[in-house]
Image (cartoon, rainbow, N blue to C red):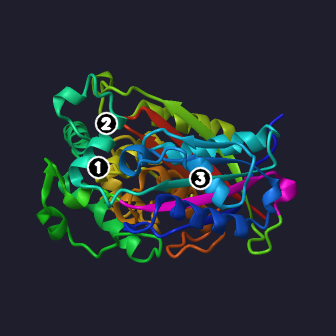
Amino acid sequence: MMRPVYVAGTGSTRFGKHAQTPIEALAVDAGAQALVQSGIDRQHIGAVYLGNFISGPLNGKEVLAGLVAEQLGLKGIPCTKVEGACASGGIAFRHACLMVATGVCDAVLVVGVETMTHASTSEMTTALNCAMDNEYDGISGLTFPGLFGLAWRSHAREYGTTREDIAAVVIKNKAHGLKNPLAQMGADLSLEQVCASAMIADPLQLFDCCPPSDGAAAVVVCAKDLLHSPQHPARIRVMASAQTSGSARVAQHPDLCTFDATVLAAQQAYQQSGLQARDIDLVELHDCFSIAEIIDSEDLGLVPRGEGGRWASQGRTGLQGDIAINPSGGLLAKGHPVGATGVGQIVEVVLQLQGEHSNQVLGAGIGMTHNLGGTGVACTVHILGREA
């Protein structure tokens, strides 16, 4: 029997540039916020899971989970660093939920953290390309902007998606980021400004790409009997937690307009929760590039196949639309400190379900997160709901 899992507390630093702050200090900051907000005594925390991707090559640190736990006064418990490329944070959250659901622990701390902005462009690119199968794809010289540029061309050819459609995603998410105090790069952009930005990997331009970022986010999950935070009387339950895998090689994706791992994870999450796509009020999904939001929204079943671009340009994915997509500003505006992103998405959805978000979706009762790693090699989808 699996017991219900609840979010007891959250914490986050602002995503942005923290070049002078040690990576473990950011993680400790977010973790301490989550622990205090949860109201749970630290003696009840049975494990720590920390999502991180490239602290080894960029920071020379590989034992972050233990470092962070020690500084938080959590001694003697299992501390595990989790790596799954851009899905690292989402996977860490899932592991924590499983520990509580199976009764191994009554409460678990999840942290996601990354620092990137101190590195040069070449160092960062080399590190991020570790998410590819470099033995097979590396020799092509393909980077992730190149991959998603190909995906854009495929989607445009198959469904008629236009530059204006894709720019609508950028404009929406950057505008959402302006009101989010945790976001790195909000902006009030026009179509002309998006189209005039520098070319990165044709047809992807600068504003179509998420910025590298530093930051940390944290969540405490627990069993129902430990849920007693006086700050947040609304109970936030984890209704589904799914993790899937896909190919790490570009050539093994016959259709770049879809990622099988996302489709499968969404199906599993809907089955676990007993919900359907139409029940979701908002989603924080993995818009590492503007075209990714369109593909992800279709793969999650939230938007009809091939209609993602048009829904964005028609305002149907805005705060007042059919489905609110990335009200936080998403990766495009909030930033993408890789290991922190999945946990940060959970924080954003919890704020929405508590009615406390700066870009509040009215009546939000069910929220989803989606975290995709590499060329679709790892994916997590979570569904959270508010209980009275």
Q: Residue 257 carries which label?
A: 2
Above or below, 28 relative to 45: below
Q: Where is residue 74 in the image (x, y as percent from the top left)?
A: 72, 55
Residue bounds of the magenta highlight: 213-227
Label drawn at residue 124 = 1
> Quadrant of the rendered structure where residue 97 is?
top right
The quarter of the picture where residue 41 lies is: bottom right
Residue at the spot of label 3:
67
Amino acid at dot 1: Met
Q: Is residue 134 visible?
A: yes
- Tag 3: residue type? Leu
Q: Earlier in the sequence, mark 3 or mark 1?
A: 3
Mark 1–mark 2 CB contact (< 8 Å): no
Q: In which quarter of the image is the N terminus?
A: top right
Placement of 146 over or under 194, stated as above or below: above
Residue 258 pos. (x, y %): 36, 35
Q: Where is residue 163 in the image (x, y as percent from the top left)?
A: 18, 54
Three-letter residue code for mark 2: Cys
Q: Is mark 1 on a helix, strand or loop?
A: helix
Disc 3 to disc 1, C-alpha distance? 23 Å
Tag 3 or tag 2, which sits nearer the N-term? Answer: 3
Which element carries disc 2, helix, strand or loop? loop
Asked if residue 1 is among those painted magenta in the image, a careful observer would answer: no
